[in-house]
Image (cartoon, grey):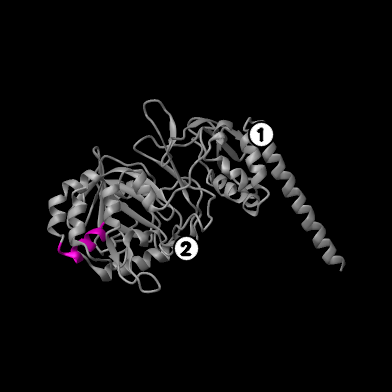
Amino acid sequence: MRRSLAILSIFGFCLRAQAQNSSDLINSIRGAGLTSLASALQLANETQEGQNLLSQLMNGNHTLFAPDNQAFDDPIVQPLANDPAGLANVLAYHVLPGNFVNSSMNSSALASGVLPNVTLGHTLLANSSLVQLEGNKSQVLAWSRNDSDGQIYFLNQNPQVNVLNTSTIGNNLLVASIDGVLQLPGNISSVLDQNNLTSVLGFLNMVNVPGFYSNGSNATVNGVLDANTTRGYTFFAPNNEAILNANSSLASLANNQTALAILLQNHYINGSSYYSPQLYSVASNGSNSNLNSSDLISAAGEPFSLNTNSSGTFVTSGNGASAKIVKSDLLTENGVIHIIDHVLANTDSHPGRASSAYASATSVAAQSSTQTGPIEGLPTSSATGTSRSNNPSNDAASIRVGSMWGLIIAGAFGWAMVMFVGV
């Protein structure tokens, strides 16, 4: 009985200490002039999600992207005042574990790539109803810096959100004040639509996966990508101009449903979300990379190769069809999209190789890894963590990447394809 009372007493003391520490942190944020953020954290602290967030903030190095007071006046944000749990999830997307300090400048400078380079990191947002990345990883945040004026801003935000200034609280918290509340990544349909990728979105809605749902009904590829069971993908999405330029090639396949399906598969990597620093690292390091063609291949079993030079970074499908990556790191709930300027017109496939590669990718994703600091380099099947820098060079180099997507069959596509290529 005495031992139980002692344990309860210690437990109560720990809870009081944690509550005091949370209060001290919130007061420090309020003292920095971020009064609206402090109030939001106080409200979120009424929920388990908010308490978990504050508990993590008080342990180890973190970067807090702190919306200024005016940002909380946005009509889109105001409904969160009546949803403390939802507010806690949004705030979790503003916190990154690890060191994001640019120590070459000063102790409170934010590390950031300069366009076209992007800095990305995993946030503390890991709610499975909002994030479905491979290996139960938390959601990613991306930002970059304009070379002309030095302005740091976030990708995937409309309207644009900018970094205003940076400071530190204590020894472990970098605070970057920003002029908006960050929006969470949506599903693939919304992201493609927001980026005016209407032609390829139409493609995704026309190609079917037979018997995908448990009741035996078909799903479009778009529906598959939105499914809760799809965790992690990389999609090289041709822009509208690329689709238009490929009109004649696509029209010639209008009556070959299998070829159309394979062509689409050869734009996907399934089971792995590869962000631009990882792709650029692979392209730059080439034969020095830790991957080979048997590790990662496309959904149809075809290898991708990546190379970078003074003109940019290029992705090539196994048959030699190539495209330039013109915009990177469009984040979704369960993957990432990179926009390319040509259709990868490859109708070759190797299902067995795709299946083997997907099994390997799934195994890698299941391994525990530390999600702190900037994302750079690619994981391997024998180790976790990262292994490469993200400094692209001007020397062309290549390595094969990819993964399985599963057999997709296009249905009722002939007349619809004619309409599609005319978009």
Residue 197: x and y, percent?
30, 46
Question: Which amino acid, by three-letter code, is at mark 1?
Answer: Arg
Q: Point out the frontmost of discs 2 and 1.
A: 1
Residue 279: x and y, percent?
33, 49
Dominant secondary structure, magenta: helix
Q: Which residue is mark 1?
A: 30
Q: Is residue 144 visible?
A: yes
| 108 sits left or right of 295 in the view | right
Bin the neighbour count of mark 1 within 10 Å (Cα to Cα): few under 14, some 14-19, many 20 and up: some
Lower position in the chain sequence, tag 2 or tag 1:
1
Residue 266 belongs to the span the image colors magenta: yes
Tag count: 2
- Which segment did they paint magenta? 255-267
Bin the neighbour count of mark 2 within 10 Å (Cα to Cα): few under 14, some 14-19, many 20 and up: some
Secondary structure at badge 1 equals helix
Is 406 situated above or below 168?
A: below
Could you tell me which quadrant the N terminus lies in?
bottom right
Residue 330: x and y, percent?
37, 46
| 282 sits left or right of 124 in the view | left
Look at 66% across and 39% down and name the residue there.
39
Disc marking residue 367: 2
Look at 67% across and 31% down and name the residue there.
31
Residue 80 belongs to the span the image colors magenta: no
Q: CA distance from mark 2 to mark 1?
A: 39 Å
Residue 375: x and y, percent?
44, 48
Q: Is residue 176 visible?
A: no
Question: Between residues 366 and 221, which one lies in front from this camera angle?
Answer: 221
Question: Which amino acid, by three-letter code, is at mark 2?
Answer: Gln
